[in-house]
Amino acid sequence: MPKMVTLTIDNHPVTVPQGTVVVDAAKKIGVDIPVFCYHPKMEPVGMCRLCLVEIGRPMVDRATGQPLMNEDGTPKVQFGPKLETGCTTPVSEGMVVHTQTDGVTAARKDILEFLLTSHPLDCPICDKGGECPLQNLTMRHGPGNSRFLFDEKQHLGKNIPLGELIYLDRERCIQCARCVRFQSDVVDDPVIGFYNRGRKLEIMSNSNPGFDSIFSGNTTDICPVGALTTADFRFGARPWELKSAASICTHCPVGCNLTINVRREAKSGGDVAIKRIMPRQNESVNEIWICDKGRMAYHYAESKERLTSPLVRKGADLQPVSWDEALDLAAEKIRSAGQLVTLAGGRLSNEDLFNLAQVTQKVNGRALLHTHMAGGDLVARYGLPEGSDLGALGKGDAILVIASDLHQEAPVWWLRLKQAAKRGAELIVLNPRETRLDKFAGHVVRYPYGQEVETLSVFLPGAQVPEALQAVVSAFQAAENAVVFYGSEGLGLDGSQAVAQTAAALVFSRGKTGQPNNGLVAVWPNGNTQGAWDMGFKPSADLASAVRTADVLWAAAVDPASDDPALAEAVDGARFVIVQELFLSETARRADIVFPAQSFAEREGTVTSGELRVQRYYPAIRPDANTRPDFAISAQIGLRLGLKLEAHLSSLALLRAVEKVPTYAGLSYQRLAEVTEQWPIFGRKDMYYGGTGYANSQGLGVKLALAADGINPHAAKESAGMPPAAVNGLVLVPVTRLFDRGATVMPSTLLHQRLADKVLQLHPRTAEKLGLNADSDVLVAANNWTVEARIQLDENVPVGVALVPRSTGFPVTAPLAAAVTSRVAVPEVYGGLRS
Amino acid sequence: MSEFILLRHRDIPDLDQLKVYLKNGGFEAWKKVVTSMEPVELIQLAKDSGLRGRGGAGFPTGMKWSFVPNNLWPHYVVANADESEPGTFKDREIMESNPFQFLEGLMIASYAVQAQNSYAYLRGEFWQIGLKLNQKIAELEKAGFLGDNLFGTQYSLRLHVHMGAGAYICGEETALLESIEGKLGQPRLRPPFPAVAGLYASPTVINNVETLTNLPPIVQNGATWFREHGTEKSPGVKIFSLSGCVNNPGNYELPLGAPFRKLIYELGGGIPEGRTIKAIMAAGASSALIPATEAALDTPMDYESVANLGASLGSASVIILDESVSMSWLAQKTTHFFKHESCGKCTPCREGTYWMAHILDRIEDGGASAKDVDLLFTVARQMQNKCLCALGEFSTMPVVSSLEKFRRDFLARVDGQTR
């Protein structure tokens, strides 16, 4: 515990930890000291000078060191000759702060008048107008009239794209440097900075593409004026027209808390439409930040391509039918099916998955999860339990990350681990190539793709530790607490299973299962992959044959047919196919019945994050009247099969699940809506302090209890390994990129410049050996497919393999030998580069 | 005074040649400190001498050195050779003509805090001097005065010349450090002070060129000798850069405490064309104006006496203004300078200098009213005590003092009188 210090602010005593600055101490007791440059998540700089207050300190007799007293026995307090900045001054014992004196009020007015001399005062057309700290503070503290001549205002560019996602209005900028500091200090993307000086000081981007950061949208939240706006929301709506709905991001397993802002729009026929996605504070999950994918990849919900009617195959075509007709047909097919195979995806809610699993069980079907990652059962047993907090990891804690490019797979976790390392946590990164996490790690271990288990096993007790790894292994073993993250860098299902088992064994071996800040975390490919495991879905080692031999294939929120030609063929082989989807996907095109489902924005539900936190999202927009949420679709099929399932209220569906899934015991929508006070105090009344993100009044989520089934994990004996490369070929290694080309990303056209390309990433030496150059076009062939791709050279890629980004069009789910042929015909004499 | 202490090149031709410098006692002080003095002795010597910083603030040099903690390493010494105050041109003459005495001083200061790498930070316009200093440093390395294990001791030292890019703010010591580190030249928040967390977050001493140039003679001749010059509280000699409305502008080395009258009339040859002196700026553009009364002219030029006039001695860049100068014109000139040089980091300076410059432009153009004169005063006053560093505060000095003491000049412009 840090030492506590007691001081007096405006006659109120307050006790705060040593090192707290005056502004924060005041905030604790509801005294608002206005700030522009100060932000509670960043180091103070004292630039804007708005937080000037009177600060007095107890006087001490220099000779004796004793405090000097007034005649009435109170300590004598000496005030400095100048006002001091409350944001840079740490509290001290006995300090006396005045924030409401005439001097302080005058200083605020003076500083605001200065700021307004160069401000365009275009509030009526400014996106920030209505939620603007400068506007609010001017109304409260500022002068009503300016003594500055309007004609002397400096006019500057108002429409400057720092990148295609973020626009700068140079006139509005008040040079507080919050954005610059956020980019360099918080997210380590120092891609914007100041140029020039004085009144000419301006923000510029120094990266190509402009503002090249996956966290760039956050700068628009913390910008205290309308200088930075997202291309997504710019001129989209006035803040006071917006209504809010709490939500959870389902793009990755972090589970960032969101607020969806909506308003009525003509384009939605007078109905509400999503205007923007904002972060919602959850200090244990995402603090007040979200990545740009979470912020901008929501447009799929409002896509014109969404399904709006149940479809049934009649002859060659899928034709719109009534819900009853489609449901009756589905129930009949499932009832009479010899083998039902239910294939679900990780973006469904727990309620959806539970109902699907119940129906599947009822007819002795197989509940399969479409994923390339294993180990959900192990995470349920050895995950991060109640009391764990990524925001609290620090000295004495070890964090081991294996096979994950966390910056791309789960950006906000990357941020949390970076911070934990800064607080003193022992961060250990095991990965075959350099990632953005390495820089912050105390130890980095490289291994060849396919040697994951061998590398991780070294950390197990009693293992033979090579000389070079002794320091890192003892650092891990010496730590009081240990969290192990495993991802899917270069891994297929087999490989993932081996890594998960070994990682679980490593966590178990420490004997601290169930203790806070100890456990296993899976960097899942989807937002609710963990929930799918918990509800009874498991991946299949041979998905193609499971699908092909199904009498009825019931696919929900998955599109196997577009992922892999082999799976497309398998889907064609299934005798009857039922699909629940948002879009007419490749799989849906092949289906016999298609049910139009609802997106996360149109309904409520719960999802379980990779660190076992169940969180609740709320409806933001009205669904199309002819769509239904997935849980309702499966429940209505179940009802026809004589199963009693909740088909109307998601909250009741969860209560059903809670009865059957022991680790979910005690969960309810009420509990998921509980909040406790968070620090920093953040919210809409005081946007000057932390920005325009949202406070959390709709739930911080609940950590699951760990599953206890008494089976101890065994480390895998060996990795799944790598297939031998073909002659003139390569082993393709799947890796994850944040901006993939998945169906939930593509409709957000704004992000198209950032999308991962369909490229083979090679080490220059590998390319040379194969006679390939940067940017050359190639044909990649393996199994029964051939795709076109481009070559990209990268010295970080290990020699002899090619990285292929997932969800960009390569049917590569696990390391795979492939032949690579230049598309430019090569004369025979140069060797047989043809496959 | 017959002999120069700092401007010795005026007595000794070719003092910028190492041979000549050595023949005239050069680097004897350096050898003495490295081979026979403990750093604490050297710090005590600096304290005893009463040497005060010549960059403007007049902070006791020995005390500055003693703030450097001995549990944090490495230490750095940085010579502030940015010399960017308008009206100051003393460091330039030292570095151009007596470079070895400056470098020897920098080396002695480095030894005092046991720095092994020290920097000379020069404004960008001094690139020729920078090239020359690099040559001199190379000569010193060759001659064994710089490098490893000097004079057979454990002590090693290297000097580096770093060129700025021509920003006034980089004469402010924390902005200077940012600039050396390759960052935008903006002042840092204090505390922590550079003595604890300076260059590359290590303890750092920053001394002015002239301050450092005083060190070799102090080491050779002792504190008592040094105190024979100047006053009790401001001992030693000072180079006064005299400019403005005066017949013989230039650098003059005088003991601290010499009266203004001696500098302006005896050495400076008085005011051109027999005009009357009007005011003195003792600290370059950052000065509060001193109306040139008889009493003011008899005031001794030391830190305390000038402060008593409500002004500051600063770096002793004495700018003389005579009756032909309108103070509103002067305020316009200084304000434009500060507006141009404001780094933009803090609000009052960034916006205040811009605003003041516009008001002054209007006053000078004759398009203003008496109300604007009042506005100018309140704008300057509302900047005061709110700025992050001294630049913003200094920018108000000529404005406020000229409005207080020569308001008639502004009102004359407002009334449409031509200059």
Image: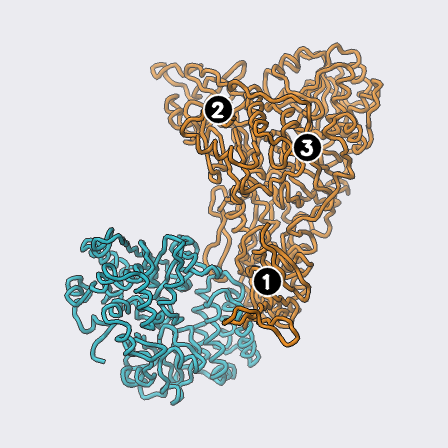
For label 2, the crowd category at 10 Å Cα-Cα, with few meaning under 14, some 14 to 19 and many 20 or more, is: few
- The three-letter code of the residue at mark 3 reads Thr
Q: Position of residue A260 (x, y in %)?
A: 70, 42
For mark 3, give the secondary structure.
Answer: strand
- Chain hosting mark 3: A
Residue shown at the point (39%, 28%) measured from the top left: A764
Numbered disc total: 3
Above or below, A590 relative to A140: above
According to the picture, the residue beneath numbered tag 1 turns out to be A93
Q: Where is residue B229 in the image (x, y as percent from the top left)?
A: 28, 78
Q: Can you see residue A112? A: no
Q: Distance between the residues labelled 1 and 3?
A: 45 Å
Q: Residue A608 carries which label?
A: 3
Q: Do labels 3 and 2 share a chain?
A: yes
**Residue A504 shows which numbered tag?**
none
Earlier along the polypeptide chain: callout 3 or callout 2?
Answer: 2
Mark 1, chain letter? A
Q: Which chain is orange?
A: A
Q: Is residue B119 left or right of residue A36?
A: left
The answer to whether dots 1 and 3 both sit on one chain is yes
Shade of chain B as shown in the rendered figure: cyan
Name the residue located 24 percent from the left edge and 70 percent from the top edge: B217
Q: Residue A463 carries which label?
A: 2
